[in-house]
Amino acid sequence: MNQKISITLPSEMVSALEERVEAGLYASTSDVIRAALNALDREEHDLDGALDAKIREALADERAGIPASDVFARLEKLHSEGRTSLNDGE
């Protein structure tokens, strides 16, 4: 079932939609939005897959991890020094 909605876009995005329709790439602005959402869905699916793979890889890593107490001590030190990363102030 199709449903009509109203959205507000910056003029640059409206121009990009209209240019694609005028160039004959899409039949309507709705088709451009549908294609964009499909592309976003694919991108998010791919990202989820990549993140899942990294998590599985990390969980399977048998090397010794860093003890949580060490991590928190480093974070507390950075915070007390007003730093936001290990590279700040170095």
Image (spheres, grey):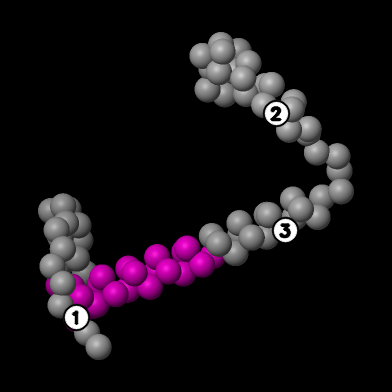
Q: Is residue 52 above or below residue 29?
A: above
Q: Which mark is residue 71?
A: 2
Image location (x, y in percent) of residue 21 = 18, 73
State the image quarter where residue 41 is shown.
Answer: bottom left
Q: Earlier in the sequence, mark 2 or mark 1?
A: 1
| Magenta portion: prevailing SS class | helix
Q: Residue at x 38, y 73 (%)?
A: 38
Q: Quadrant of the C terminus?
A: top right
Disc 3 residue type (three-letter): Arg
| Secondary structure found at label 1 | loop
Between 74 and 89, the one nearer to me in the picture: 74
| Secondary structure found at label 3 | helix
Crowdedness near tag 1: few (<14), some (14–19) or many (≥20) residues, C-alpha within 10 Å: few
Q: Which residues are magenta?
A: 22-46
Which of the two discs, 2 and 3, sits closer to the camera? 2
Q: Is residue 16 above or below residue 30?
A: above
